[in-house]
């Protein structure tokens, strides 16, 4: 039995040696030039007059000034939804009438299952994943009221 296996292994090695190999295709030459090989531009468009210092000053004066950025309150940071603690007794409230999720997505389907006054446990029983509930709470799509 061992001898047969050895013979089969020897024959397969011989066949592999005899199998012709296909020549590898030539490397693909890119038509785009690299930055190093690209010809340098003269710094202005061909046919345009050379820039003078007077012209640069008048162009800067004609340009309107950029408005200053308003120093408003910094954007509110969204809390990490994975670290939110959801209790099964928490009541879901503040459900929007318009679904914030794109139609046809899983999130849209989950959001349609929310009803004002249902608990987190009832939402999970209805088929909404706990992670989706936490995400919606973190992003302000729903609110939770703790009973107790």
Image: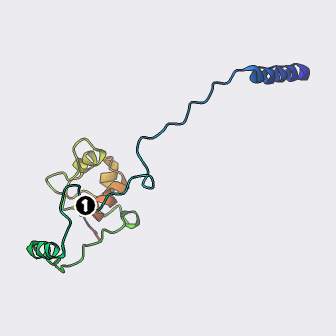
59 above or below 28? below
Q: How many marks?
A: 1
SS label for mark 1 = loop
Quadrant where the N terminus sits is: top right
Q: Tell me which residue sits at (72%, 20%) in the image.
A: 19
40 above or below 66? above
Q: Tell me which residue sits at (25%, 61%) in the image.
A: 44
Residue 81, x across and y down, in percent? 36, 63
Q: Please tell me how crowded label 1 is: few (under 14), some (14-19), or many (20+) other residues with Cα within 10 Å.
A: few
- Kindly tell me whether residue 66 is visible in this rendering: no
Q: Residue furthest right?
A: 3
The quarter of the displayed image where residue 7 is located: top right
Q: Tell me which residue sits at (20%, 79%) in the image.
A: 73
Residue 117, x across and y down, in percent? 21, 59
Report the side of 72 relative to 139 (left or right): left
Q: How is this picture coloured?
A: rainbow
The quarter of the displayed image where residue 143 is located: bottom left
- Kindly tell me whether residue 76 is visible in this rendering: yes
Name the one closer to the observer, 126 or 38. Answer: 38
Q: Which residue is mark 1?
A: 44
Q: Tell me which residue sits at (26%, 45%) in the image.
A: 109
Residue 106, x across and y down, in percent? 30, 45
Name the one closer to the observer, 73 or 1. Answer: 73
Name the one closer to the observer, 41 or 122. Answer: 41
Residue 148, x across and y down, in percent? 30, 72
């Amino acid at each position: 039995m061992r001898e047969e296996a050895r013979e089969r292994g020897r024959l397969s090695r011989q066949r592999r040696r005899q199998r012709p190999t296909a020549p590898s295709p030539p490397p693909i030459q890119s038509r785009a030039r690299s930055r190093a090989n690209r010809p340098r531009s003269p710094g202005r468009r061909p046919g345009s007059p050379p820039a003078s210092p007077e012209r640069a000053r008048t162009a800067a004066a004609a340009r309107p000034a950029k408005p200053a950025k308003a120093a408003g309150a910094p954007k509110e940071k969204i809390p990490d939804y994975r670290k939110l603690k959801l209790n099964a007794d928490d009541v879901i409230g503040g459900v929007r009438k318009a679904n914030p999720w794109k139609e046809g997505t899983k999130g849209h389907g989950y959001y349609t299952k929310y009803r004002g006054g249902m608990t987190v446990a009832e939402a999970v029983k209805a088929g909404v994943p706990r992670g989706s509930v936490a995400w919606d709470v973190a992003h302000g799509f729903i609110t939770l009221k703790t009973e107790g």
